[in-house]
Amino acid sequence: MLGLSRLRETFAHTPRTLGLVWRSSRAASVTLGVLTLAAAVLPLGVAYVGKTITDAVVARDERAALVWVAVELGLVAALSLAQRGLALTRQLLGAKLSIDIHTRILDKALSLDLRHFEDPEFYDQLTRARREASSRPAAVVTESFALVQNLVTLAGYAALLVGFSGLAVLALVVAAIPATVAEARFSGAAFRLRNFRSPDARRLNYLEYVLANDGHAKEVKLFGLGPMFRERYRALAASFYREDSALAVRRAGWAYGLSLLGTAAFYGCYGAMALGAAAGRLSLGDMVLYVAAFRQGQQAFQAVLSGVGGMYEHNLYMSNLFQYLGIPTGAPPALPDGGAAARAAGEGAAAGERGAAGEGAAAGERGVRFEGVGFRYPGQPRWAIRGVDLHIPAGQSLALVGHNGAGKTTFIKLLTRLYEPTEGRILLDGKDLRAWDVDALRRRIGVVFQDFNQYQLNLRENVALGSVEHLTDEPRVARAVSEGGAEEVVAAVPGGLDAQLGRWFKDGVELSGGQWQKIALARAFMREEADILVLDEPTAALDAEAEHAVFQRFRSLSRGRTTIVISHRFPTVRMADRIVVLDGGRVVEEGTHAELVARGERYARMFALQAEGYL
């Protein structure tokens, strides 16, 4: 039973892997199969022709000897061509397959939810999948075809050897088995070792990234962090080396010791063949044929068993890839009770088009509504937000205020469906967000997060990425640059919109934090169809005067749109039509700036503390 279980593990993922290869390149797959069969059969012909040449020499038949030498030359040339063709096909197919597999890994990453990217276990899975993606699928293909090739060759040599002795065939088989069993065991040990230390492998990559990345260079040098991180890197890498070298030494020792069994079996049979030839029971040609058949058959059988061991190892690693590709993409959960009513209320609302956004929605239902919304991050016992009931009418500007960790950014993630509520529901124009097409929903929302990205692309693309469909729409890019207040940035950098930003590539220009922030704001304004604009601490890197100018412009450009602003600066906050104060994930206050100050509660205290800083 154990043997059958191991055999199933050995080839468990081979069919799926071969399916990937077939989809990657059918022509290369067929070519590989044809060349494999040729490379399997031709050595048998060479061995037989060698016997014939020897017999012709013994018989002093010069003409026959020359003819068979020419035949062997042709067979050897054909074998060399087949082998080189196999190597070339494997190389090209491997390169194509590597691109296709990496593309599948990236496609899978794009299909997953934000929660996956905030889960360390997911990163372990991703690391394991990417680590072997370049080599293992191609190795499975190579081993599979090589296995077929060696099996065909072995069958031919075994048929030849049976004419000499069935015991020779048995010796050929038995002598190679122990080494193969040991190899399979060490392959499993190596796989378990690499999987076990996936978190440490990611830590090693992170330390290398910190030591050799421009984003960390300033602090690493200023605080003298280099020696400490380098020592951690060296210690962790050294522990990897110790584990790998210990396993490699044991593996090599066992492989050498057990390979001597095969060598002993060969020379035992060789001696028997030599005695038979000396006694006249075998012709010299027969002895040459049987010696070649046994030697080549032994190598073919060892290659078969080694291939089986290799397939076992490759399939173990392929399980990582298929496990990653099999991660559920997290289809939107079923709507809770009342979902049908939400759908009915939102019937007729256009999916993502601003002009028809509220068509068919009940009066008073235009805008965003949170109903008993609570959310808890996966694996976390604490609620990020809880019991939020809030209506944001269409066209209203809302400011979210609260200490760090109060739930403000979580609020935005739920609104944009980066996460689904753990409890309650969120409606847009009377329709539950879970009933919306995600792409249509997100086209209606323009967002600038406080941790916005700085793309190592040219300036034009950094702006235009806000609406990929309009990447080459120059007038729209120009409007976005103007509305985001980034015109002076464009004027200041050599090359203007064509300037390469960042230091990763040649002639790149590094911007200040404030300049990057203006580019991010311009990127948000690229989404002209959006009727909901969200700014999550978008001006943190700007001085007070620049921030005031941005928000004055923002107010004038966002008229008629629903706007949500998160900010710690009260001159900005007080511009909003309504202010909501979050604390501990709950709404604790709500009203205009004047109303909240008059109440003298949490908002008023925060306002007073900030005001003291200006006195």
Image: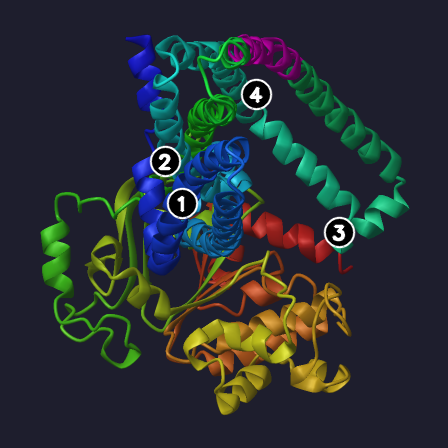
Q: Residue at x 73, y 63 (%)?
A: 504
Quadrant hosting residue 239? top right
- In primary-sequence order, the first of circles 1 and 2 is 1
Q: Residue at x 73, y 87 (%)?
A: 491
Residue 332 image point, x, y percent: 25, 48
- The answer to which of 66 and 390 lies nearer the viewer is 66
User: Chief secondary structure of the magenta span?
Assistant: helix
Q: Name the residue under label 3.
A: 213
Question: Is residue 398 located in the magenta-colored stretch of the structure?
Answer: no
Q: Distance between the residues labelled 1 and 2?
A: 8 Å
**Residue 148: which disc?**
2
Q: Is label 3 or label 1 in front?
A: 1
Drawn side of residue 451 relative to residue 296, left or right: right
Q: What range of the chain is rendered magenta?
A: 250-271
| Residue type of the residue flagged with mark 4 | Leu
- The answer to which of 26 and 223 lies nearer the viewer is 26
